[in-house]
């Protein structure tokens, strides 16, 4: 999951903690460097800058929502739009999360990598989104199979042997 830090801003000689909601309300836009691995390979931790805007109405399938969960900010992709909420998951995660409309505070407008800006309307970005979601069943099968094999190897006591063979 992408967790993000809240920056401190000087305000009339007093340090005031500004929330992402405050910044979005004030500027209409929020730019920050990501943390976490749940949106890899699209967004890389501590490398890419994301540009978040205030949503204009309900989100659509494949939008990337910024939402608040238990005091943390999370940036994940909308997979299914439902009547009052969304089913959301990170590009590098394998479980859905139900996110109510009121938890969504922003939507990805684009991101910057190595000085180049990618708008969400960019054709290469759109191709990536559709491809990455089309191969999700294969990625999920690989993930769950690998996890099951590791669990079994741990249960049988052969995990250290397998790690040694694999060179890890």
Image (cartoon, grey):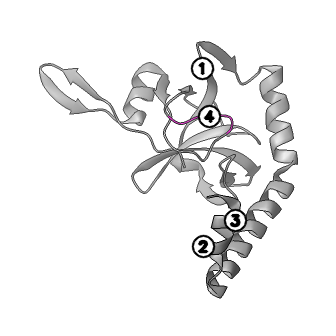
| Residue 15 in the image, given as x and y percentages of width and height | 17, 29
Q: Distance between the residues labelled 2 and 4?
A: 32 Å
Name the residue tied to disc 3: 165
Residue 110 lies, with reference to residue 66, above or below; the image says above
Name the residue tied to disc 4: 43
Counting residues from the start of the chain, the first of labels 1 and 3 encountered is 1
Q: Please name the residue shown 82% across and 63% down the image.
A: 141
Asked if residue 78 lies in the magenta stretch, the reply is: no
Q: How many marks?
A: 4
Name the residue tied to disc 1: 112
Could you tell me which secondary element the residue under label 1 belongs to?
Answer: strand
Q: Please name the residue shown 82% across and 46% down the image.
A: 133
Badge 4 crowding class, 10 Å Cα cut-off, few under 14, some 14 to 19, many 20 or more, is many
Left or right: 134 as drawn, with respect to 16: right
Badge 1 crowding class, 10 Å Cα cut-off, few under 14, some 14 to 19, many 20 or more, is some
Could you tell me which secondary element the residue under label 2 belongs to?
Answer: helix
Could you tell me which secondary element the residue under label 3 belongs to?
Answer: helix
Task: State yes or no: discs 1 and 2 in contact (Cβ < 8 Å).
Answer: no
Q: Give the range drawn in magenta.
A: 41-45
| Residue 147 in the image, given as x and y percentages of width and height | 69, 69
| Residue 73 in the image, given as x and y percentages of width and height | 46, 45
Mark 1 vs mark 3: in front: 3
Counting residues from the start of the chain, the first of labels 3 and 2 encountered is 2
The circle drawn on residue 155 is none
Q: Quadrant of residue 100?
A: bottom right
Q: Distance between the residues labelled 1 and 3?
A: 40 Å
Asked if residue 43 lies in the magenta stretch, the reply is: yes
């Amino acid at each position: 999951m992408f967790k993000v830090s809240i920056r401190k801003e000087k305000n009339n000689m007093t340090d005031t903690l500004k929330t992402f909601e405050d910044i979005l309300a004030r500027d209409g836009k929020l730019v920050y460097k990501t943390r976490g691995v749940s949106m890899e390979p699209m967004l890389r931790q501590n490398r890419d800058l994301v540009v978040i805007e205030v949503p204009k109405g309900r989100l659509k399938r494949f939008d990337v929502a910024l939402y608040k969960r238990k005091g943390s900010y999370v940036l994940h992709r909308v997979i299914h739009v439902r009547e009052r909420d969304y089913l959301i998951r990170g590009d590098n995660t394998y479980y859905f999360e139900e996110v109510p409309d009121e938890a969504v505070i922003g939507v990805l407008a684009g991101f910057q990598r190595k000085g180049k800006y990618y708008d969400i309307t960019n054709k290469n970005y759109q191709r990536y989104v559709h491809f990455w979601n089309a191969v999700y069943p294969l990625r999920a099968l690989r993930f769950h199979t690998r996890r099951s094999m590791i669990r079994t190897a741990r249960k049988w006591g052969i995990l250290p042997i397998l790690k040694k063979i694999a060179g890890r």
